[in-house]
Amino acid sequence: MKKILIIQNKRIGDVLISSIIANNYKAKHPDSEIHFMAYDFTHGVLMNNPNIDKIISINDKELKKLPVLLKLIRTVKNEKYDIIFDPYSKTQSKLICKFSKAKQTIGHKSRKKLGNWGYYTHPIAISKVKTKICGKAIEDRIHLLQQAEEFKTIDYEPKLFLSEAEKNENYLGNFKDKKIIVFGILGSTPQKSMPYNYIAEMVDFIANNYDAYILFNYAPHQKAEAEKIYHLCQNKATIILDIYAPSIRDFIKLMNQCDVLVANEGGSVHIAKALNKPTFTIFSPYVNKEHWASFEDGKFHTSVHLLEIKPDLFESFTFEERKRIEQNPEELYNQFTPELILPELDTFLKNNL
């Protein structure tokens, strides 16, 4: 029996798609023991997953403290893992791998030319382009998996596992007489959030053209910002503002009872896809769509990116250029007007409502 560790010290969407490593490994080796190390706020996408035997909780701020990191390294070393997969390959996780004494440590080579300093027994170059509909981020993780051994059968789709009790919880109250569009009005970071007046214009378009409720999705700490968008909307009659998920697990249960998702790119999109809900994704100008646009068929899952509509705005889309845009996304976001998005959104809603 092999003992496996997956380290994914990143956000919710990254954690969910990295769980495909556990799903595929356990499918081939049901007697293996698989542990998953992730930030505490992301655990909701891992709960009830029968392919993960233990979730190891870490805290972003605490892990940056050297004594905390050293203690974690000792803990991992004492676990005597056979294989460690490190999809994000961050400094802390590289050090954990280097000193883990695991037989195989598998992660991505550094983009920098300084070398890889022996962090991994199997340092893998990140592929430059996607080749499958699942998107490059998922392909990269499967590539890591296949360094451990050959997997002839691969399941590329992330999964969420809800109990019967969770499926039957009533999150929607009396809002059951119409279809419900979950609208992710704010991104997980300010850089992934569209201008508020643009969001309000899109909300009004939906409200004026579709007989459906529009449920504003936002994190609890974003409520004041959500209210600002709400007050900018002209047609408030069908907006649901006060049903929101206090945790990621609650959002999963809530999304499972709704019909479609319209959202800025982020974890909510990956969750909706894992629940087999139609998704319309609005990409931030600095995000590489090839990495994160998974399973898009132009109908059930579709998206918009400014690069596709106005390619002349981008001289290049290198890692360095994306970082530059991320520092000041408003410059390009202001050109990503609702008029460019609404025709695509209208087609999506007609197909899926």
Image: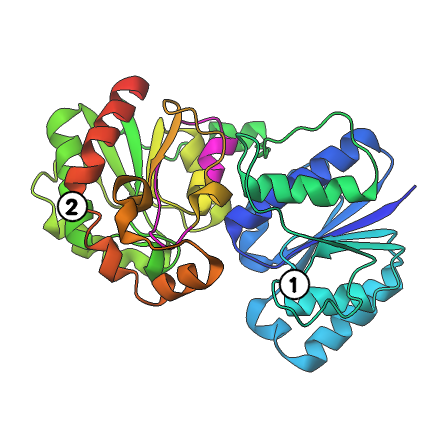
Asked whether the residues under the numbered discs 1 and 2 touch, taking CB atoms below 8 Å apart as contact, a structural biologist would say: no
Does residue 268 appear to the left or right of 203 in the view shown?
A: right
Q: Amino acid at mark 2?
A: Ala
Q: The N terminus lies in which quarter of the figure?
A: top right
Residue 228 image point, x, y percent: 17, 56
Q: Is residue 178 visible?
A: no
Q: Nearer the viewer, residue 284 or 353?
A: 284
Residue 270 in view: yes
Q: Sort mark 2 into few (<14), some (14-19) or many (20+) by Cα contacts within 10 Å.
A: many
Q: Which of the two residues, 131 or 166, is positioned nearer the viewer here? A: 131
Residue 53 is left or right of residue 14, and the answer is right
Residue at screen point 39% across, 23% down: 300
- Magenta-drawn stretch contains 222: no
Residue occupying image coordinates x 14% and y 51%: 197
Please say if 78 is above or below 345. Answer: below
Is residue 271 covered in magenta?
yes
Dot 1 or dot 2: first in sequence order is: 1
Horizontal side, residue 2 vs residue 204: left or right: right
How far apart are the alpha carbons under marks 1 and 2?
41 Å
Q: Residues within 10 Å of mark 1 (few under 14, many from 20)?
A: some
Find residue 114 and report its image quarter. bottom right
Image quarter of residue 162? top right
Q: In terms of secondary structure, where does tag 2 sit?
A: helix
Residue 175 at what x, y percent from top left?
27, 29
Q: Residue at x 48, y 59 (%)?
A: 319
- Which quadrant of the view contains residue 69? bottom right
Residue annotated with mark 2: 200
Tag 1 residue: 110
Q: Position of residue 41 (x, y in %)?
A: 53, 57
Residues drawn in magenta:
270-287
Q: Say which amino acid is labelled 1.
A: Ser
